[in-house]
Image: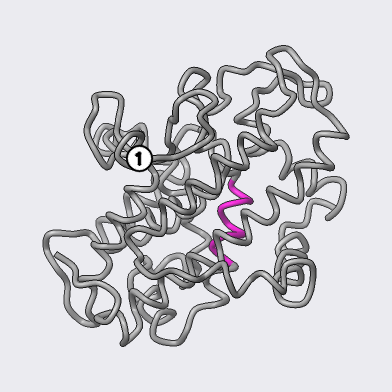
């Protein structure tokens, strides 16, 4: 564990920035999840986290982005997204979940399933030498956020909107970055006085007693932890088609109208990612996990 702690600490200072749910988006997803953990799951998560984060999962929710360009972890780069056929507006696991070389299961939906399987080997006080379960926890927590970002399940030709160059208000950006970061940062500035905690509390209000309270019970429904990521990815590509790509062309300027209509989608997906991550961790680390899946 000590060696891993040193690597993570170094990464926090040296890693390059990459496009993903913004740091704030991933942190809110993980904070929501940790607040919803049952005692057994909360204890397991704290046992797996390095000591220096003092039990705070959100402190390392961007770790998977920060190490993806390191030689040791380059293999993880395809795990952050899914490229689907242009304008098909569908995700088919057997068709779409592969890396650029055609290796199967190398996509964000496959990553959620893979690291779930690894974590199901966790037992308090023991370890399985085949897996680094601390890394598995951090990967699962991050990729659960990524699979809920609509443009992470985008079209092949534009790399999930990365090649659609445009302006966000007055500065240059691209469509993928708008969904990863721009909408979140604009909301923080306009609605929350740049206070991430206030943003998170607003999300929690919406799923406990507000706009999403009637739907939240369905978010965590999952008959098979290894197949549910396909549903989450399908939701994302449907949202990408309806709200991400629709009406957007290369060279456009996106501003108030786009922000106000898309921000509710971004907010809900952050919350859904958190609720579902909690559901996964509660099943993985709860006493009833043997009734869900038999790990291999």
Comparing 148 with 231, the one in front is: 231
Q: Quadrant of the N terminus?
A: bottom left
Residue at x-position 79% and y-position 51%: 194
**Residue at numbered disc 1:** 107
The colouring scheme, among rainbow, by chain, secondary structure or one colour, is one colour
Q: Is residue 129 left or right of residue 21?
A: left
Comparing 177 with 100, the one in front is: 100
Residue 126 at x, y percent in the picture? 17, 78
Residue at x-position 65% and y-position 37%: 179
Residue 124 at x, y percent in the picture? 24, 82
SS state under label 1? loop
Residue furthest toward the top?
Answer: 251
Residue at x-position 40% and y-position 46%: 64
Magenta stretch bounds: 23-31
The image quarter in which residue 209 lies: bottom right
Q: Is residue 1 visible?
A: no
The image shows residue 44, relative to residue 62, as above or below, that is below
198 part of magenta stretch: no
The image shows residue 265, relative to residue 254, as above or below, that is below
Residue 204 at x, y percent in the picture? 70, 70
The image shows residue 241, relative to residue 53, as above or below, that is above
Q: Is residue 170 left or right of residue 94?
A: right
Comparing 134 with 223, the one in front is: 223
Mark 1 surroundings within 10 Å by alpha-carbon count, few (fewer than 14), some (14 through 19), many (20 or more): many
Residue 62 at x, y percent in the picture? 48, 49
The image quarter in which residue 116 lies: bottom left
The chief SS type of the magenta part is: helix
Residue at x-position 30% and y-position 24%: 100
């Amino acid at each position: 564990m000590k060696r891993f702690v040193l690597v993570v600490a170094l990464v926090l200072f040296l890693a390059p920035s990459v496009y993903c749910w913004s740091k704030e988006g991933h942190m809110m997803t993980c904070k929501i999840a940790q607040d919803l953990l049952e005692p057994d799951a909360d204890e397991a998560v704290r046992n797996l986290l390095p000591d220096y984060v003092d039990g705070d999962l959100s402190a390392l929710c961007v770790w998977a982005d920060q190490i993806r360009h390191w030689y040791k972890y380059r293999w993880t780069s395809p795990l952050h997204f899914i490229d689907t056929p242009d304008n098909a507006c569908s995700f088919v696991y057997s068709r779409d979940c592969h890396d650029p070389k055609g290796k199967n299961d190398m996509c964000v939906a496959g990553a959620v399933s893979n690291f779930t399987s690894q974590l199901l080997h966790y037992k308090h006080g023991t370890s399985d030498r085949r897996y680094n379960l601390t890394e598995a926890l951090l990967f699962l927590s991050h990729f659960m956020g990524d699979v809920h970002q609509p443009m992470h399940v985008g079209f092949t030709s534009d790399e999930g909107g990365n090649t659609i160059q445009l302006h966000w208000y007055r500065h240059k950006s691209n469509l993928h970055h708008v969904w990863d970061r721009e909408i979140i940062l604009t909301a923080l500035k306009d609605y929350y006085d740049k206070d991430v905690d206030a943003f998170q509390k607003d999300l929690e209000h919406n799923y406990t007693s507000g706009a999403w309270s009637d739907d939240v019970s369905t978010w965590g429904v999952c008959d098979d932890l290894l197949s549910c990521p396909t549903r989450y990815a399908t939701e994302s590509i449907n949202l990408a088609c309806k709200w991400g790509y629709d009406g957007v062309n290369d060279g456009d300027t996106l501003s108030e109208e786009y922000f106000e209509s898309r921000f509710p989608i971004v907010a809900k997906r952050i919350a859904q990612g958190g609720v579902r991550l909690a559901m996964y961790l509660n099943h993985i680390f709860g006493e009833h996990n043997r009734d869900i899946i038999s790990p291999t």
